[in-house]
Image (tube, helix red, strand yellow):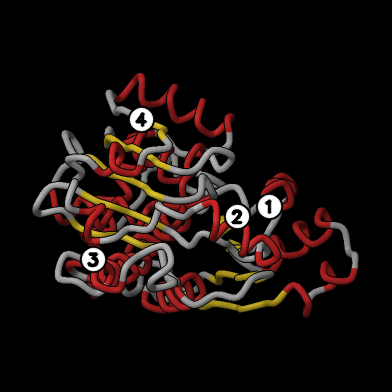
Amino acid sequence: MTYYKETTKGKDMLSLLEWSNEEIAELVQLALAIKTNPAHYSHTLSGQILGMIFDKPSTRTRISFEAGILQLGGQAIVMSSKELQIGRGEPIKDTAHVLSEYINAVMIRTFSHEGVEELAEHASIPIINGLTDLHHPCQALADLLTIFEVKNTFEGVKLAYIGDGNNVCHSLLLAAAMVGLDISCAMPVGYEPDETVLHQALQIAAETGATIEITTDPVLAVSDADFVYTDVWTSMGQEEENAKRFADFAGYAVTGELVAHAKSDYHFLHCLPAHREEEVATAVIDGKQSLVYQQAGNRLHAQKALLVMILG
């Protein structure tokens, strides 16, 4: 039985932009189906091998991808770049061609987005971005799944993002635009999202009817929101900026006072790991309206859907 559209077979996921709006919507629906009846898909990728390369520490990305390919009947090979010749200077081009001879797809979690693009350029197998400094598409797919589970629609739903205009923010902007979800992002001056990514999201939103707002006012962003989302203020590789960022983001913590401006039935989201009492109050992230564990769990189902659509 075929579980994928021919248009997604063998497709990369470097950012959400490689996929059409319709394909992203289909992926969310497939993720729901897989979550509801995982046994039905337990042999879908029998014999397929997913290689996973890590330059950064990982909990959710590593375990959800490894568990996901196993639950679909395939296998995983986990690799650190330090254990590969690429870690001591082998050209990305050579690594891409060689891996294409051995396995069916690669998921890579690293720093440079350009490096992942180069890997995809030379590989003949699908490349999945498990995280780069520019995009985090797999997280955004899980976020869409979580929002749809709660609302059963994206139309007329507002997502507020409070925090750095980082890779998570970039992928959320694109994801929201593609499915017609309204999004308002608040961050201090100097921490705005990448101008190119924002322009791309605005172009897509003009077609789907989504509204995109960038502001320095967290109250404005959260006002009447259905979901309030934040991320750490200092991402991996930015540790030397911690003190400055802590000062710059003063007033941007997601507190009980801030979420009081959202809808009374709002839900809180965070991609994790979280720093309680920094970017989010403990009472909010551990409160009854928090969906962070459901959201993290949905990484598994969204990524299984992704794997099925590119390899199934």
Q: Are marks 1 and 4 in contact (CB under 8 Å)?
A: no
Q: Which residue is mark 1?
A: 116
Whether residue 23 is visible here, answered yes or no, is: no
Q: Which residue is mark 2?
A: 127
Q: Which residue is mark 3?
A: 291
> Dot 1 lies on which element?
helix
Per the model, the C-alpha gap separating discs 2 and 4 is: 29 Å
Q: Amino acid at mark 2?
A: Ile
Q: Which residue is mark 4?
A: 212
State the image coordinates of residue 292 (x, y, percent, origin top left).
29, 68
Work out whether mark 1 precedes mark 4 in sequence or the reverse, and give the earlier one: 1
* Relative vertical location of residue 91 with respect to residue 202 in this rendering, above or below: below
Work out whether mark 2 precedes mark 1 in sequence or the reverse, and give the earlier one: 1
Q: Amino acid at mark 1?
A: Val
Per the model, the C-alpha gap separating discs 3 and 1 is: 31 Å
Per the model, the C-alpha gap separating discs 2 and 1 is: 8 Å
Per the model, the C-alpha gap separating discs 3 and 4 is: 23 Å
